[in-house]
Image (cartoon, grey):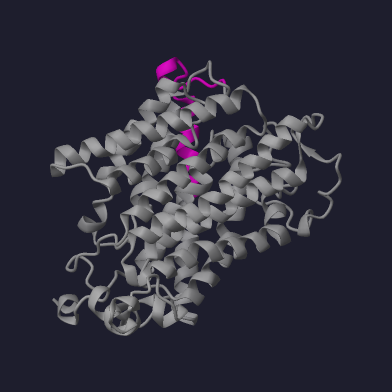
């Protein structure tokens, strides 16, 4: 891989992009927090925020090295090569045109949100200690290796880079496979092991604060411009293409989701708008530098429509993916990754032609292979991790805690102090938050 001279403009852009991507995790916390019932909002926020601490420490200690160290056969980076980010403080050490330490910081924010995404599938019922343990183990065994496969590129060989990027040569510009398909498959495995919430399919479990949901979606979209455009690793034309495509993909998906709601249900909802935005952003993430703006609209529209239908699968198949991580991130990631094989534009910065641009099936099979490998690996290993943790420490809170709410039982706090209206805090919590036992048992 050719090492270029460090460029201050590129460095400044990647630093700003890293901050934008890091902001996405608090944005995700708001997005998820508003979607749960009021008795679990703090726990949902904590699952995202503490992931920043857990994965942030692991990334510095060994994660970056596992993802971007010299490769063992294309499957894993040398975990000791850059342990504690050793050697990256050298101002002359560069990754493309930015200091390697800046690149490490940018990728750290990716690692954090990849793990945090999974938490939405097990809202309301997972032990906080079990989540913290799972987040650490999953990052080490699943995310860091997958990031190496997809993001560690070394000019077409597997000696120093990952096998999906170098040997299979699947295109994943900013994480459709390594982050979204990866997290979505893990979410499915985890929610299958932990089981459904009490009253799932019988008791309404509506979002308690749609204002938080919309705020979270807005922060995610804002941060996603750093997520995608920052992945160009420079203030350049590729970043501009990715920025425009990020706008187009999110916008088209929002309209597509709302159209499905309007035709299917008779009304368009704010939750649908927020979910559509996220679905489109997930879809365009792998394709941001390989499709035209028209292609981005197609990707976004397809992701919005398909994800709007996909979230209903949990009711038909009986798995309780609380906040639709599978329906949005797994399905959206698959849509964006596979559509590259059809509509990749040779005039785009990636320079690859999809099937509809005369490229034949060459890029399509590469996209399918990359997506399937990550999806299967993530599901199988996550299922094994969850089973071991369930047998050793238990994944799930007891029924009484789930009924009362994890916030008070685990964190000794409530999201909303309502005592000022004249009732005791406990009385208000029982009246306004906890469903009646007969509703749960119905």
Q: Position of residue 64 (x, y in %)?
A: 69, 53
State the residue at coordinates (22%, 75%).
435
> Up-down: is 405 above or below 361?
below
Residue 3 as seen in the image, left or right of residue 433? right
Instruction: Write the start and end of the magenta stretch as one range.
Output: 351-374
Q: Position of residue 360 (x, y in %)?
A: 44, 20
State the residue at coordinates (44%, 62%).
119
Front residue (pair 72, 28): 28
State the residue at coordinates (58%, 50%).
22
Q: Is residue 201 magenta?
A: no
> Up-down: is 334 above or below 44?
above
Prevailing secondary structure class for the magenta stretch in the rendered image: helix
Front residue (pair 87, 91): 91
> Up-down: is 393 above or below 204?
below
Q: Is residue 371 magenta?
A: yes
State the residue at coordinates (67%, 63%).
57
Q: Quadrant of the N terminus?
A: top right
Residue 36 as seen in the image, left or right of residue 376? left
Quick check: can you spot residue 34?
yes
Counting the numbered discs, the total is: 0
Q: Quadrant of the C terminus?
A: bottom left
Front residue (pair 264, 235): 235
Quick check: can you spot residue 379?
no
Q: Position of residue 72 (x, y in %)?
A: 71, 50
Figure quadrant of residue 264 = top left
Residue 259 as seen in the image, left or right of residue 48? left
Front residue (pair 147, 411): 411
């Amino acid at each position: 891989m050719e090492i270029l001279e460090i460029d201050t403009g590129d460095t400044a852009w990647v630093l700003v992009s890293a901050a934008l991507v890091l902001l996405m995790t608090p944005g995700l916390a708001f997005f998820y927090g508003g979607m749960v019932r009021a008795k679990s909002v703090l726990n949902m926020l904590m699952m995202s925020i503490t992931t920043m601490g857990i994965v942030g420490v692991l990334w510095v200690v060994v994660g970056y090295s596992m993802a971007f160290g010299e490769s063992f056969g294309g499957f894993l980076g040398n975990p000791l090569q850059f342990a504690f980010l050793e050697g990256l403080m050298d101002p002359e050490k560069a990754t493309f045109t930015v200091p390697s330490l800046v690149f490490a910081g940018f990728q750290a924010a990716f690692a954090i949100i990849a793990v945090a995404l999974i938490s939405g599938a097990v809202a309301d019922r997972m032990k906080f200690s079990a989540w913290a343990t799972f987040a650490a183990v999953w990052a080490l065994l699943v995310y860091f290796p997958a990031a190496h496969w997809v993001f560690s590129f070394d000019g077409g060989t597997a000696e120093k880079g990952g096998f999906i990027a170098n040997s299979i040569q699947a295109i994943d510009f900013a994480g459709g496979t390594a982050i979204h398909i990866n997290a979505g498959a893990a979410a499915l495995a985890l929610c299958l092991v932990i089981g459904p919430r009490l009253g799932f399919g019988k008791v309404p479990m509506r979002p308690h604060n749609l204002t938080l949901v919309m705020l979270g979606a807005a922060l995610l979209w804002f941060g996603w411009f750093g997520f995608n455009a920052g992945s160009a690793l420079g203030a350049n034309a590729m970043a501009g293409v990715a920025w425009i495509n990020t706008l187009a993909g999110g916008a088209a998906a929002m309209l597509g989701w709302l159209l499905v709601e309007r035709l299917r249900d008779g009304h368009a909802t704010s939750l649908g708008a927020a979910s559509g935005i996220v679905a489109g952003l997930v879809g365009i993430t792998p394709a941001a530098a390989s499709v035209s703006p028209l292609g981005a609209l197609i990707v976004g529209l397809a992701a919005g429509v398909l994800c709007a239908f996909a979230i209903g699968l949990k009711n038909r198949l009986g798995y309780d993916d609380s906040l639709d991580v599978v329906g949005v991130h797994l399905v959206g990631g698959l849509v964006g990754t596979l559509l590259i094989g059809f509509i990749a534009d040779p005039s785009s910065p990636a320079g690859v032609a999809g099937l509809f641009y005369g490229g034949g099936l060459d890029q399509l099979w590469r996209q399918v292979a990359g997506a399937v490998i990550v999806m299967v690996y993530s599901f199988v290993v996550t299922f094994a991790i969850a089973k071991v943790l369930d047998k050793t420490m238990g994944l799930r809170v007891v029924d009484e805690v789930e009924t009362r709410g994890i916030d008070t039982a685990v964190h000794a706090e409530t999201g909303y102090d309502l005592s000022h209206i004249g009732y005791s805090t406990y009385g208000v919590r029982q009246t306004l938050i906890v469903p009646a036992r007969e509703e749960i048992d119905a």
